[in-house]
């Protein structure tokens, strides 16, 4: 993974690691709640299900995304962030809002739910505005940046739709379709676009691939966005376009791997491929209208495995860059690959993968997820200590 340009001042390590740490705790609490209350899987409107979904997606997924983008956007745009210190305001607002919102779901306290949701939404707005200012000052543009710009749009749209749904329950104009819009904007809009957009760049760097072509990412963005629009209007063409977009993303991934110079795939890329397999399972379940099954495999398998896998690469790089890069040439420093324990990432990934696969049919498999997340957090702690 390439470092930052000399003209770009590196961020304090506490900022990206703060997002990663809080998000990882949210993930652990989420799977622990699911393991303690497997009956929540019987209904997507169960308070614990809603709490777990927000811990997994808003807490872990969005938290890691915001933390990684604090560092990665400067690399993609080849320029500095516009307002780096705004990241701390985002971390504070989102970090306080998410547990308050989750507590509101668990206690069914509408006031607490509104307070937490409002704080979290304000944090996302600060982050989106910061990224908008950064994108506007960029001298160069590419499809990866376009993907992230679309992610910012959906990152703001998703909570807006959620708040509209909450108001509709309170004031009597409830429409169940709005919940579907909220879910689709969050799952497909935020996570499909961010994982495949950022993933294109990261897989290219982690495999030393030089034969990739970002035109496939551009076509994928068109297909996925039009597919989301079609789904919002209840058109079957939307599903076909989503399938097409995911197919283009799969071809792009295979093309990157085919042109890689690093022949042995490391644990982060292995997790990415396993997560892509879960996306295919989720897509199949979605096409056959098994939406609950699709959501479980998408969240726990696709998002869970890919995000944890990428953190096995990103976290050691961040720590090595801040802690050891200034010492190069003056004393012996560890190699980047020596920062990561050898066996715990694979054990964590195995437990997460098996747990995600089995949980729709055997809810006690949630304890496998708890074990997998436990080893994942242990691995990150070991990286931070080295």
Image (cartoon, rainbow, N blue to C red):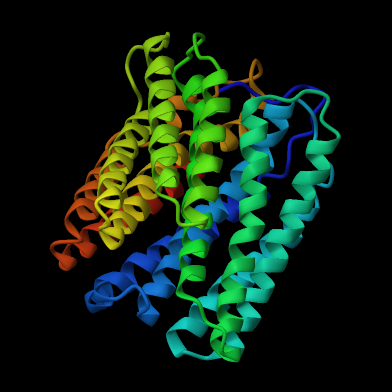
Residue at figure coordinates x 42%, y 8% from the top left: 261
Q: Position of residue 323 (x, y in %)?
A: 62, 35
Q: Position of residue 191 (x, y in %)?
A: 49, 47
Tell me where residue 148 sits by quadrant.
Answer: top right
Question: Relative to residue 350, is residue 179 drawn left or right?
Answer: right
Residue at figure coordinates x 57%, y 71% from the top left: 162
Tell me where residue 157 sits by quadrant.
Answer: bottom right
Give the number of callouts.
0
Residue closer to the observer: 294 or 130: 294
Question: Relative to residue 89, is residue 232 drawn left or right?
Answer: left
Asked whether residue 92 appears in the rendered view, the answer is yes
Which residue is the extreme one toward the left?
Answer: 362
User: Does residue 4 sit above or below 27 in this rendering?
Assistant: above
User: Does residue 347 sit above or below 104 in this rendering?
Assistant: above
Q: Quadrant of the N terminus?
A: top right
User: Does residue 341 sit above or below 332 in this rendering?
Assistant: below
Residue at figure coordinates x 54%, y 15% from the top left: 213
Q: Position of residue 172 (x, y in %)?
A: 56, 90
User: Does residue 180 sit above or below 138 in this rendering?
Assistant: below
Q: Position of residue 96 (x, y in %)?
A: 63, 72
Tell me where residue 318 sits by quadrant.
Answer: top right
Asked whether residue 59 appears in the rendered view, the answer is no
Question: Relative to residue 31, is residue 74 drawn left or right?
Answer: right
Residue closer to the observer: 233 or 350: 233
């Amino acid at each position: 993974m390439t470092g930052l340009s000399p003209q770009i001042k590196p961020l304090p390590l506490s900022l990206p690691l703060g997002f990663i740490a809080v998000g990882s705790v949210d993930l652990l609490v989420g799977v622990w709640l699911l393991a303690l209350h497997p009956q929540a899987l019987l209904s997507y409107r169960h308070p614990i299900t809603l709490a777990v979904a927000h811990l997994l997606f808003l807490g872990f997924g969005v938290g890691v995304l915001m933390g990684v983008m604090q560092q990665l956007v400067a690399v993609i745009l080849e320029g500095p962030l516009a307002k780096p210190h705004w990241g701390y305001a985002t971390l504070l607002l989102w970090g306080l809002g998410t547990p308050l919102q989750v507590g509101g779901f668990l206690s069914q306290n509408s006031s607490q739910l509104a307070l937490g949701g409002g704080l979290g939404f304000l944090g996302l707005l600060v982050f989106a505005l910061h990224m908008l200012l950064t994108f506007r000052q960029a001298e160069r543009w590419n499809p990866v940046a376009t993907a992230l710009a679309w992610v910012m749009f959906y990152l703001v749209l998703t909570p807006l739709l959620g708040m509209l749904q909450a108001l509709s329950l309170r004031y009597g104009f409830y429409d169940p379709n709005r919940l579907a819009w909220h879910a689709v904007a969050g799952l497909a809009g935020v996570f499909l676009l961010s994982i495949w957009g950022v993933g294109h760049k990261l897989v290219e760097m982690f495999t030393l691939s030089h034969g990739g072509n970002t035109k496939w990412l551009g076509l994928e963005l068109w297909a996925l966005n039009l597919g989301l629009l079609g789904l919002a209007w209840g058109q079957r063409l939307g599903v076909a376009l989503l399938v097409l977009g995911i197919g283009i993303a799969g071809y792009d991934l295979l093309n990157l791997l085919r042109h890689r110079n690093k022949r042995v795939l490391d644990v982060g890329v292995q997790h990415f491929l396993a997560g892509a397999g879960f996306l295919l399972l989720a897509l199949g379940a979605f096409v056959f209208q098994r939406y609950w099954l699709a959501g479980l495999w998408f969240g726990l398998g696709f998002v869970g495995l890919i995000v944890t896998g990428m953190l096995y690469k990103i976290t050691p790089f961040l720590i090595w860059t801040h802690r050891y890069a200034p010492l190069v040439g003056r004393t012996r420093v560890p190699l980047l690959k020596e920062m990561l324990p050898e066996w715990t990432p694979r054990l964590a990934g195995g437990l997460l993968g098996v747990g995600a696969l089995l949980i729709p049919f055997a809810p006690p498999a949630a304890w496998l997820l708890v074990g997998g997340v436990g080893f994942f957090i242990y691995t990150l702690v070991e990286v931070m200590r080295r």
